[in-house]
Image (cartoon, grey):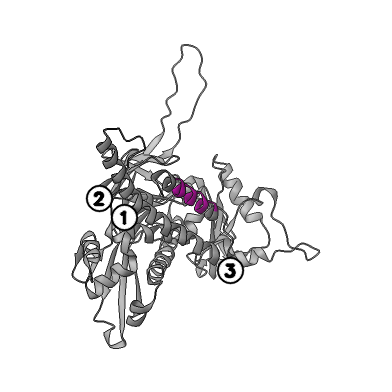
Amino acid sequence: MNLHQLRQRKAELRSATSAIIAAPGGADGLLSDEQRTAVNDNFAELDRLQSNETILERQAREDSEARGRPLTDTPANDGIEYRVFAEAISHTAAEGIETWRTDNGERVPVLGREQRIADFVPAERSAASDIGLGRFIGALIGGPKNDLERRALAEGSVSTGGAFLPAPLATEVIDHARIENVAFKAGVRTVPMANKTMRMAKVISDPVPSWRAENSLIAESDPVFGDMSMDAKSLAVRFVVSRELLEDTPNMDALLRSTMAAGFARGLDDAIFFGTGTGNQPLGLANTPGLQSVSMGTNGGALAGYAPFLDAMFALQAVNEGKVDAIVLAPRSNRVIAGFVDSQGQPLQPPPLLANVPFLSTNGIPTNQTQGTANNASSAFLGDFSQVLVGIRTQLQITVLNERFAEYGQVGFIGWLRADVQVARPAALAKIVGIKP
C-alpha cells in the first residue's frame, strides 16, 4: 500500500465509522454489539495506518531528497496547529473541526462524537501503538520482554506502581469512552485539555437590538460575557483481572480498553447530568443555574403522554432556543414512554415536533429524587446538547495493584481520567423534574 492508498483507506474508515456512530442500531439509541465491534476494528486499523503513514512519509521524503525533487504529497506536519497534548503540538488538515482559542492564544479543537481525539496524536513512530494496550500493561506488570516493549514503556512516563499511558493508547480509551457515553450521543462535545486548567469565554446574555431615528443616539445593549473555566477533576475506575487471563487471552488489548472505557463512560454520564460541583465532582446539568424547567407537579407525577416534553420544547422556544438534539432520561421513564398506547391499544406515536427527536436513556439519571412528598422521582433533559462541553485531560494514568490481590492470583488496576463539565449556554437546555413511575 502506497501513501496515497493509505490515506484513501483512512478516509474510508473515518467515513464508515462516522456512518455507524450516526445510526446506532442497539437499544436506547446506543450502538449494537455488532456495531461496537465494527467501530473497535476500524479504530484499531486507523491506529495501525497512522503508524505506517509516518514511515511511508519519511521514506517518501528521503526518496525525493535523493532524487533532488520536492515532495508533492502532504507531509505529516501540514495543517492547522492544535494544542491537544501537553508534550507536543498536533497538526491536522482535517476539515469541519470547530476551533476555539484558550486564554493564552492556543488553538483547541471542539469535537463532536464522530471526531476522534486519536486523530490529533502527533505523527511520529510510536512503539506503544505497535504493541497495544494489552502488551503495554503486561510489560508494566512483568517487565519488558524485548526492545520494542522497553521503548513503549519509555513513552509512558512509568513510575512506581503505574504509568501515564502514551498518547496513542490513552486516546484509544478516551475515544471508546466517548462512544459508549449517552451524553456524547445526545450531542455533548469534547474539549481536549493539555493542562489541568483551561479558560474560555461564554455568552451570558445576548445584545438587544433597537430601532433608531435619524441622528438619534443608538441605545446601548451589549452582550454579557462570562468566564468559563475548565478545571480537571479525577475520575477513577478499578477492576481486577486474573493472571491467567492476562497471559493467555489474545484479545486482552480490546478487553482492557473496553473495560476502562465503560467505567469512564458511566462516570462521565453521572457527572454531566447530576454532578454536584462539590467533593471534586464537576457541576452537572441538574445543578446548573439557568436551564429552563418544567415540573410534573408539587409532589411529582407520572408520564401519561408527551405533553411535558412539548412544554419543555416551548419553554426553550420562548427564549429563542428551540434546537433539540435529543431527550435523555432514565431507563424507567423511557420504558413508560415506549408503552404509551392510544384508545385502540395501538402504540402512541409522538407528535410531529418530537417525531425526529431521539429518546436516549442512561443510568446516570437517578430514580430516587425527592419532589415534595415523593422520593422516587426522576428527571429528563432536552435541548441543544452541543452547548455542553466536557473537558478531558489527554493524559490517562493507570495504576497496577500487584500486591493487593496476589493471594487470589489476580492483578488489580485503577484507571484515572481527569475531566470537567461546563455549559456554554444554560438557557439552551431544559429539564423536566418530578417524573414518578
Q: Residue 214's x, y, as percent?
A: 49, 12
Q: Which residue is mark 3?
A: 332
- The dominant secondary structure in magenta is helix
Q: Check the image and name the residue furthest to the front.
A: 67
Structural distance between the alpha carbons of marks 1 and 2 = 8 Å
Q: Considering the numbered disc 2 on the image, is that residue within a helix, a strand or a loop?
A: loop
Q: Earlier in the sequence, mark 1 or mark 2?
A: 2
Q: Considering the numbered disc 3 on the image, is that residue within a helix, a strand or a loop?
A: helix
Q: What range is drawn magenta here?
A: 8-19
Q: Check the image and name the residue furthest to the left.
A: 160
Q: Which residue is mark 1?
A: 394
The answer to whether one can see residue 117 in this image is yes
Q: Check the image and name the residue furthest to the right.
A: 344
- The image quadrant where one finds the C terminus is bottom right
Q: Are marks 2 and 3 in contact (CB under 8 Å)?
A: no
Q: Residue 360's x, y, as percent?
A: 56, 59
Q: Residue at x 50, y 54 (%)?
A: 17
